[in-house]
Amino acid sequence: ASPFRTGSRPRRIAPRASAWREDAARDAIGRARVANLARVSDPHEKPRFRVRVETERVALPNGHTAELDIVRPPGAAAVVPFVSADEVLLIRQYRHAAGGMMLEVPAGKLDPGEARAACAARELEEEAGCRAGRIVPLGWIWTTPGFTDERIHLFAAFELEPVPHRRDADEVIETLRVGLDEALELVFSGRLNDAKSSLALLHAARWLGRIG
């Protein structure tokens, strides 16, 4: 059975982006504003997101031993939202660590005890303002196995319905509706260079039979 609704034209979820263009001026303004903020650390303020860093002494396969610092996040889920067989939703999000805006798919960390598919569905609603009628697992990836055991679980979402988004105050996000072929071209051209999003789009396109 097709994962897409039939009988009526899909409702418009987000503005259609006919072509992706870098908005260098807006990114520069965003970086300037951030640069002007004082970096203040309040020792009494509870961190919004914590990871564990553990130092382990390990025996390596070559017979040597080493002390390795391992970052242990809770894991995460990323989801490719399909508006139709030929269109997906991307988000354009400000990432301070990367120095500006980035193209991504909706994603976020797992809450304690949360199922992976439930996390993908929740992040889709929170970041993109869409509720999925169907979520399909696509596999998972290691993010940076040189120093972390984090896995991101990849999903595709179908039968979307618009709902109010629930973005946090520190999430600066725009939603873009683009063709699947255009999204893949953004990956191959390097204009979409977020690893989880690139692999999620490739897995989703292969699941649909669009690439071999």
Image (spheres, rainbow, N blue to C red):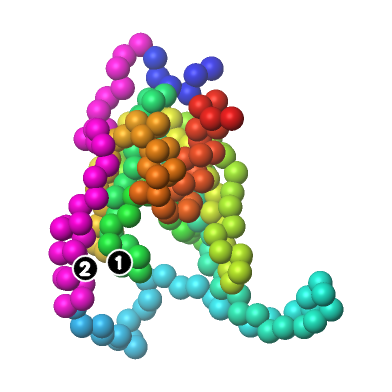
Res. 33 image quadrant: bottom left
Give the residue type at disc 1.
Gly
Left or right: residue 49 versus residue 29 is: right
Q: From the top left corner, tell me how far across and down residue 209 is, in percent.
A: 55, 25
Give the residue type at disc 2.
Arg
Above/below status of 189 relative to 66: above
Above/below status of 30 relative to 183: below
Res. 212 image quadrant: top right
Say whether residue 119 is visible.
no
Tag 1 residue: 99
Left or right: residue 51 versus residue 160 is: right
- As rendered, which of 49 and 186 lies closer to the eye? 186
Q: Are marks 1 and 2 in contact (CB under 8 Å)?
A: yes
Residue 74, which numbered label?
A: none
Q: From the top left corner, tell me how far across and down residue 96 is, in percent.
A: 31, 67
Q: Residues within 10 Å of mark 2 (few under 14, many from 20)?
A: some
Res. 41 image quadrant: bottom left
Is 191 magenta? The answer is: no
Tell me where the magenta segment starts and ends, as one range: 7-36
Above/below status of 172 relative to 124: below
Left or right: residue 204 versus residue 186 is: right
Rounded to the nearest angstrom, the CA distance separating label 1 from label 2 is: 7 Å
Kindly identify the residue that appears in the image at 78 percent across and 75 percent down.
Answer: 60
Question: Which residue is farthest top?
Answer: 7
First along the sequence among labels 1 and 2: 2
Tag 2 residue: 31
Say whether residue 180 is visible.
yes
Please tell me whether mark 2 sits on a helix, a strand or a loop.
helix
Please tell me whether mark 1 sits on a helix, a strand or a loop.
loop
